[in-house]
Amino acid sequence: MKNHKFLKLPIDDQLIDLFKVLIEQNNKIRTYYEQENDFLFVTMKGTTINTSSTNNAISKQLNKYAKRYELPNINPHAIRRAFAKNLYDKGARCCVDF
C-alpha cells in the first residue's frame, strides 16, 4: 500500500480455496526455476510481476472499455472496492491465515 499499511479485505471460502491452489502451484514454479519469493502472484517463471507496467496496462484497458460502453468511474480501485464490499455484504470473513 502507498501508506505502507496492510489492507484487510474480506474473502469467501471459495476464494480461500483458490488461493491455496495458487500458492501450491506457485511453489512448484518457484522450485523449478529456483526462485525465492513469497508473492501470491508471480510470472510464469516464478519471478515478481512488474506492478507499475501491469497496473498501467490494466488501467488502459479499463479506460478503453469505460469509454466504449459509456461506464462512469471505472478504475482498478473502484472494482477492487466493489468486489470487497460485495463479499463483505454476503458475510465473507476478514483476515484469513493460510
Image: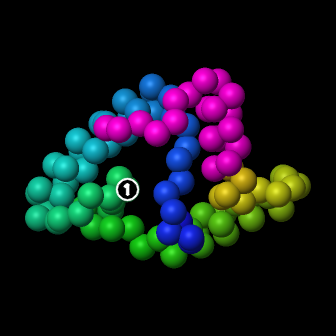
At 87% from the left and 55% from the top, the residue drawn is 72
Q: Position of residue 35 (x, y in %)?
A: 17, 65
At 64% from the left and 24% from the top, the residue drawn is 90
- Please name the amino acid that badge 1 sits on: Phe
Q: Position of residue 49 (x, y in %)?
A: 39, 67
Label 1: few (<14), some (14–19) or many (≥20) C-alpha neighbours in 10 Å: some
At 55% from the left and 44% from the top, the residue drawn is 9
The quarter holding residue 14 reads top left
Left/right placement of residue 60 relative to residue 39 reads: right
Left/right placement of residue 36 relative to residue 7 reads: left
- Residue 95 is covered by the magenta coloring: yes
Q: Position of residue 96 (x, y in %)?
A: 41, 36
Q: Position of residue 20 (x, y in %)?
A: 31, 36
Secondary structure category for the residue under label 1: loop
The residue stretch that appears in magenta: 80-98
Q: Is residue 70 above or below residue 48?
A: above
Whether residue 54 is visible here, answered yes or no, is: no
Whether residue 56 is visible here, answered yes or no, is: yes
Is 22 or 13 nearer to us in this picture?
13
Residue for badge 1: 41
At 16% from the left and 49% from the top, the residue drawn is 28
Q: Is residue 15 above or below residue 91?
A: below
Q: Is residue 58 above or below residue 79?
A: below
